[in-house]
Amino acid sequence: VWGKNVGDLARFVEETTGIQPAREDQTDRFIKVKLTGDQIELLREREEVERRVFSGPHVLFKIWYDKPFAPQAMYLPGVEDEVLRTFKNLTCIKSLAAQRMFDACGQAIHWAVIDTGIDVNHPWWKGQTWDETTNIDFSGENTTEDLVGHGTHIAGVIKLIAPEVTLYNFKAIAKQGGSSFSLIRAMYHVRMANLEAGHVKIQGVNLSVGGVVPVKSYGCGWSPECQEANALVNSGVVVCAAASNDGYKILPTISDENELEYFSTYMTLGFTDPGNAEEVITVGSTHSEFPHRYGPSYFSSKGPTGDGRFKPDVLAPGEKIYSAWPGTTEMKSLDDLVALSGTSMATAHVSGAVAQFLSVKPEFIGLPRQVKQMLMATCVDLNRDRNFQGAGLIDVLNLIQRT
């Protein structure tokens, strides 16, 4: 339930339906509550009567179902290859060069991974302290453990690029899936944590997730999760969001004989939320070794948005990206890594790259719009359509040198 003032909204819901919204199911604008169809109708009728008949305040804006969210990754088997080829993705965005030339390793930068959880015992983040402030479950699964693998993989990519960054494990997706409100709660928590700290303590958020776009109800880019993502940026946090993997789909159709058939299409089906949000850095995928040759990945969603805005904003490597996986105790060979493809992986590259940048240019902490503008201005043009490549392939070294 979406309203102007959450206190008034909670009282409105309780007085009308008899249900008291739990405190943990409230943010500053949204409330999660389980309602019957009759109760929803009661809320709608009371809002209309008080506003139109008695000229009362507009308390309730919208009621929406808590739609599902999922990781934006394509699960692939490990690819036999040379170990040195494993991290071509780091060379592709000049991350290793930035580490060596500027010691850009994410020092003193804090980044939240809102995902399926993180295996906090993984050796890649040995030495980091995980406590009740850095390791929180918003999914309702009552554990912060990564039971899917996606979140650990994303965290691993960020750590490869910015090895000294401090990660926050904000789990919003359970093994059986996530919901829009769990995502909203996690983003809201980042805002509140920074507010309580009195400064931008958590400088960035990675959102390698996506859910259906309710354009009929909200318009493109204005869903509750998009609004919360924009609010997070407005509070001073860099938000990197996956474009989604709908650039290529197999769609079901019904034939003239009433039989189910399938056809493949390279026509984009658009971005998922919160990738549609205007203020976030929306990330598409490209090839790790030959981005100029292959351009945007076939699966990477293309623009424009449903309301005609340019997206994605940038591209980063997202094909067959090797990274960490839950339960791994040794990292001696490719057998200890897992390769995944998707705009999820590409998004993690941008999170790591921005963490690198902020660690050597801390004067830009709290200025996410400027960071986004500079990131896009220093991209490598792949000579593809703007709605396919955005500003182009990110270049960390160029970003640091030209700033």
Image (cartoon, helix red, strand yellow):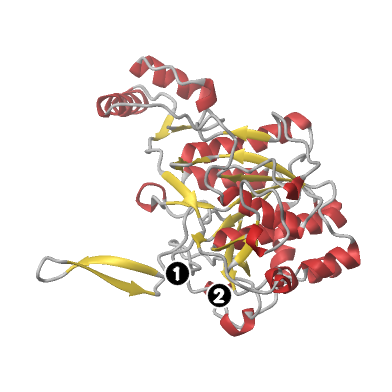
Front-lying residue, 71 or 315: 71
Q: Is residue 208 left or right of residue 124?
A: left
Q: Is residue 284 visible?
A: yes
Q: Position of residue 382 (x, y in %)?
A: 63, 80
**Contact between labelled residues 1 and 2, with CB atoms less than 8 Å apart:** yes
Dot 1 crowding, Cα within 10 Å, few <14, some 14–19, many 20+: many
**Label 2 to label 1, Cα distance in Å?**
10 Å
Examine the rendered structure and indicate whether residue 1 appears above or below residue 281.
above
Look at 63% across and 69% down and name the residue there: 317
Front-lying residue, 28 or 249: 249
| Picture disc at residue 296 | 2
Front-lying residue, 378 or 294: 294
Front-lying residue, 373 or 342: 342
Q: Amino acid at mark 1?
A: Gly
Examine the rendered structure and indicate whether residue 224 appears above or below residue 355.
above
Q: Position of residue 18 (x, y in %)?
A: 36, 14
Look at 39% across and 73% down and name the residue there: 267
Q: Which residue is mark 1?
A: 247
Look at 79% across and 54% down and name the residue there: 163
Q: Kindly give the residue lying farthest to the left in the view shown.
A: 257
- Quadrant, the N terminus: top left
Q: Position of residue 217 (x, y in %)?
A: 37, 47
